[in-house]
Structures are given as structure tokens and as C-alpha cells.
Amino acid sequence: MKNKPSLLIIGNSNVGKSSITRLLVPNPKKFKGKAGKQPGSTLMIKSIGFPQMPYKIVDLPGFGYMNSSSRRREEHIKKQLVIHIEKHHDNYFFSLVVLNALRIEDELKKYYLENDTTIPLSFELIKFLREFEIPILVILNKIDKISVFDKKKINSLLINSAKDYGLNLVQTSGEYVSDYKEIPYLEFSAIKKTNIEKLKRIINISLQKEG
């Protein structure tokens, strides 16, 4: 399993990373979840793998929106994740940047519309991964919890805001091509399993391209 390529799953806390991981593994009951979150000063980042899987999954600890965490703890987590990606970026054939569709509007309002000196964390993550040329798929999770009208409004706000940071977000058709000019996003629901087969197909396409 050591030689298998890795799929990176990253995002803020409570966006559904572990739920998505559970949908991708062949035996969800054996997946404990929250593997990367450990108390103390050191983050134990572990890969998740099964013999029948052609790749491993690294579900990185979330940060941001952590009610029980101090700011110092949050900054420590961010630093650890940056160090991890800088050191192991060559291991990753693909990455999922998971966003909570319910929080996108609030994040952009706070860090973009009302403050032009900051960058929304979601965009910061995407730009950081692009520096290492790790192919990216943005997952708009919990899409089942918003109306069709709100979904259109949120998607439009996300796409237009991203352009100001040099990011061209486009909705994926299910056939992923990594040219780094466009960043595809996929509407998703881990609870309803919306677009899970499309997600698996995109991951497998990227894995084949890597091979």
C-alpha cells in the first residue's frame, strides 16, 4: 500500500470531508473517520487505504469555524497542513477541496465583500494546491440543504468572486481534464449521495492520467 498514489481531501472543519471519505472506501464500517485529528501539539496525519483500492485517501484535519479551538490552535493546524503538503505533494494524484454550500455566502461576505484586504480561506486553499500543480476538484457539499434559487445565487457569487483571485471555476460535466486553466466544481450531497458516481468517475480518470 505504501506505493499507491494518494487522494487528498481538504477543507474547513465540518464541511463533510469524513462523510465523503466514507463514500469512497469499499468498507465504510471499517473506516473510523477523523483519522487526522489528534489532541496535543502534533497532528497525526494518516492515510486511509484498503487492499482493493487502487489509491489511498488522506483526509486532512479541518480548520476554521472551530468553536472549541483557540486561534493559536487553528494557526498551528494550518501550519502543519502547509508543511505536510509541501513535503508530500508529489504523492497526490488528485485533490478534493470540500466546501459547505451553506457557508459559502457568509465566508465570501466576511472575507471578500466586506474586507478587500483578506482572501477567503477556500480560495487560499485552492491557490496553495495549484502552486504544487496538484489537480483539483472543488466539492460543493450539502447542496441538498439549499433551494434551487439559493443554489444559483451561491454558485454565481462563488464563480464571480473567484475570478478576482485569478481562479476560473467551472461546473464539471463529469469528464475531468487537468489543464490548470480551469478549476472544476461538482455539486454534491454526502447525505443523499448526489453525484457520488460522477465523483468516483472523475477520481478514476485522474488516477489513470497519473498512471
Image: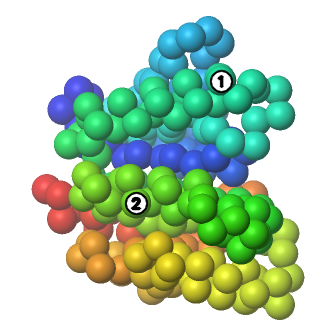
Q: Is residue 26 left or right of residue 201?
A: right
Q: Is residue 187 left or right of residue 78?
A: right
- The amino acid at mark 1 is Arg
Q: Is residue 96 above or below residue 173?
A: above
Tell which of 32 and 37 is nearer to you.
37
Q: Is residue 88 left or right of residue 72?
A: left
- The amino acid at mark 2 is Lys
- Sequence-wise, the earlier of marks 2 and 1 is 1
| Residue 147 position within the rendered picture, expressed as x and y whole percent measured from the top left | 86, 82
- Would you name the residue on which mark 2 appears? 127
Q: How many marks?
A: 2
Disc 2 to disc 1: CB gap under 8 Å? no
Tell which of 121 and 36 is nearer to you.
121
Could you tell me which residue is drawn at 32 percent across and 42 percent down?
6
For residue 77, say whether it is visible. Answer: yes
Could you tell me which residue is drawn at 44 percent across and 66 percent down?
137
Q: Secondary structure at mark 1?
A: helix
Quarter holding the N terminus? top left
Q: Quadrant of residue 151?
A: bottom right
| Residue 206 position within the rendered picture, expressed as x and y whole percent measured from the top left | 28, 64
Furthest residue in direction top, as rendered: 40
| Residue 22 position within the rendered picture, expressed as x and y whole percent measured from the top left | 59, 43
Tell which of 142 and 110 is nearer to you.
110
Quarter holding the C terminus? bottom left
- Would you name the residue on which mark 1 appears? 72
Could you tell me which residue is drawn at 67 percent across and 82 percent down?
157
Q: Quadrant of residue 51?
A: top left
Front of the two marks 2 and 1:
1
| Residue 24 position within the rendered picture, expressed as x and y whole percent measured from the top left | 51, 50
Furthest residue in direction front, as rendered: 117
